[in-house]
Every structure is written in structure tokens, then in C-alpha cells.
Image: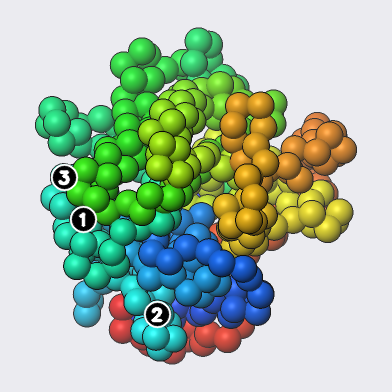
Amino acid sequence: MLIEPKIRNNICLTAHPVGCALQVRDMIQATQKKSRQAGPRAALIIGASNGYGMGSRVVAAFGYGASTLGIAYERPSSESKIGTAGYYNDRGFLQYAAEAGLPAWSINGDAFADEIKREALDLVRRRLGPLDLVVYSIAAPRRLDPATGTLHSSVIKPIGRSYTARTVDFQSGDITTVSMEPATEQEIADTVKVMGGEDWRLWIEALRREGLLAPDALTVAFSYIGPAFTAPIYRDGTIGRAKEDLEATAGLLDRELSRTGGRALVSVNKALVTRASAVIPAVPLYIAMLYRVMKRRGLHESCLQQSERLFSEFLYSGGTPLRDADGRIRLDDREMREEVQAEVAELLEQVNEENLERISDIAGFREEFLLHHGFGRGDVDYAVEVSP
């Protein structure tokens, strides 16, 4: 069939298998060009099919030669139905890893579920041996709590007061105003249950209980802080409350793992175009301005470049990783520079539908979003039919 991008409300409903595989290939080739010191031997990446999870898996495997197990919950393809971009990313990774002789396995299933944890533990026991790296990179809309059977749904809402801000449809360039009512206490609790640190803790506890963590094992999860412009809907909202729980969990895990020489860390990363960020109100408009400023100043980093810096400068630098006052790695250091944020804030004040294309990098946002779904590549003939 012919596969074309179908985008609604900043969500892409299709993905191109060839384009997605080539995107993974590009990441691998960029990673293989770097020289590195010692790194992970056996890594588990929970949430491995997109974004920072995929970036971490590529760097661990093709940068350091690690055996990897990736967990992802993606819609698989069939002969007549298109799979998700993450599904094709994962298939592409496994193909390239096999060609390179790198041991790699994937499990497609709900990382929150006990049966997926058991399947992963069994595979680690049989194939990888004790893990020295566990990356937790989950962004999920809902979670079925295996202990209670309760389904919890996360929401993107402010806390305490309503929120009004401008956002952009990156396809059409339409700038609109969105208003959201504050979350209820139940919605806050549900979002923490889905996006907080509880499941990360359950994974680490299960691995330790089965003797599948190396004594000096390192585990890292991802967070975001961001500017004042997005704070009401992000850091000060329901997602931010979940991130606070995630960061508190890191402290608890770190105290436990440090007894045998291990560590648990949180990496605060920069804003990037992802499937998740594209649908958070106000965030696409902010990213369009941020990309313009950071690219012009030579400060912009892709997801892969952020992952590479995380590994080389913090996780496997040979010393104790630098952290902020709250114990977090700050990969958002370039985004949050005072001069960068001042320029972004000025552009956000000026932007309208007439000057959007000129003073922002909305074109770069658009291009990157399409590439994440396998579209917009010059080396793929999209007029040729492919099997999904």
C-alpha cells in the first residue's frame, strides 16, 4: 500500500516502515563515529521505542557494545494494517543489531503489567545476565495497577487555578488560545500513579529480588523542568507533580543501590519534538521558538546527542556525575541559559500567525515530527507501495 502521513490534532496516525528504519540507521551511524571509554555491558531499557529511550538504547548498544533488552508497548503491523512508528523503530533496531552481531531482544507489551515484568526477568536471567544499566523512559496515558486492578489515567492539567495560553497547530500554523480548568485531587493522584516513580521502583525491586542487578548497577529516569511559559501546564501542573514523585523515588532507590556501589539518577533533559510534546498545550509554540534560538546559537541537540552526552559526560565519565542541588543531572543546561530564555521569551511576545514562519523554527518542528514517523526523507520514494 501507499503510506502517507495522516495528522490530526498534532497526532500522526500513520508511520512509514522504511523511513522509520532509516531513522534508526542514521542514529546508529552517528553513534558509531564516536570513540568512547568503558560503558554498560548489559542494559534494560523500559520504554525503548522512541525518544530518549531509543536514544539510550542506540548509544548503549552501538556506542558501548552492550547487550540490550527493550520494553515497548506499540501497535504491531500486519499485512494490511500499519503499525506505530515505535514498532517500526524497534524492528529496525533489532535488524541492525543482528547485522552488527550485537545481542538484542525486545518485548512488546505493557511495562506496568506483572506478566511483562516476569517475561523480562526470565529473559534477562537466560540471555543477558546481571544488568549494569536500567533506563526508565515511560510516557503513558494510563496504567492498570497490577496490585489493585484499578485503571488510572493521566491528564495534562494545571493545579490550583485555570490556565490560559497560546498554542500552535504546527501543520497549519494556526495560533489559538487554549483554556484548561484545574485538575481535581483524583486526577492529580491518577497522573502521579501513571507517570510517577512507583513502577520504576517496582522494576528495580523485582530485578534486585531475583539477583539480576549487578552490584554497581546504574539506573536512570528522565524528567523535565522547562521555562515559566510552560510551567502552569507542565512543571507546576499534574505532569510536574508526577515528575516530583519520580525524582523523590530516585532518592530512595539511590540510597538502596548505593549500599553495593550502585546509583539511581534522574536526568532533566531539554525540550524536544516528540509524540508526547506535540500534544501538550503551549509546548509546540515554545519549542518552535526554542529551536530557532538554540540552532542560531549553535546550542541545539537532538535526542541522540542528548543521550550521548548523558552517557559520556555523566553516567560513564569515570567520575562522580555532576548534579544540581536536588541531585539531578541537568542536560537542559543549554536550554535554560539565561540569554537563551530571554530571547525565547521575547519571541513568544512577538509571535503571531503572520510572522510565525519567519521568527520561529516551526518548519524545523514540522520536519522533525514527520521524520519521527518515517516521513519527509529524501531517500525514500513515498510514491512506491510498501508492505506495512
Q: Earlier in the sequence, mark 1 or mark 3?
A: 3
Please say if the residues under marks 1 and 3 sit with CB atoms less than 8 Å apart: no
CA separation in Å, label 2 and label 3: 28 Å
Tag 3 residue: 114
Residue 372 is situated, as x and y percent measured from the top left of the image, at: 51, 64
Q: Secondary structure at mark 1?
A: helix
Q: Quadrant of the N terminus?
A: bottom left
Badge nearest the viewer, 2 or 3: 2
Within 10 Å of the Cα at label 1, are there few (<14), some (14-19), or many (20+) other Cα atoms?
many
Within 10 Å of the Cα at label 3, are there few (<14), some (14-19), or many (20+) other Cα atoms?
some
* Labelled disc at residue 102: 2
Q: Quadrant of the C terminus?
A: bottom left
Would you say residue 246 is visible in this rendering? Answer: no
Q: Image quarter for residue 204? A: top left
Tag 1 residue: 121
Residue 71 or residue 135, whichever sits in front: 135
Residue 7 or residue 33, whichever sits in front: 33
Would you say residue 320 is visible in this rendering? Answer: yes
Q: Amino acid at mark 2?
A: Leu
Q: Amino acid at mark 3?
A: Asp
Within 10 Å of the Cα at label 2, are there few (<14), some (14-19), or many (20+) other Cα atoms?
some
218 to 98, vertically: above or below: above
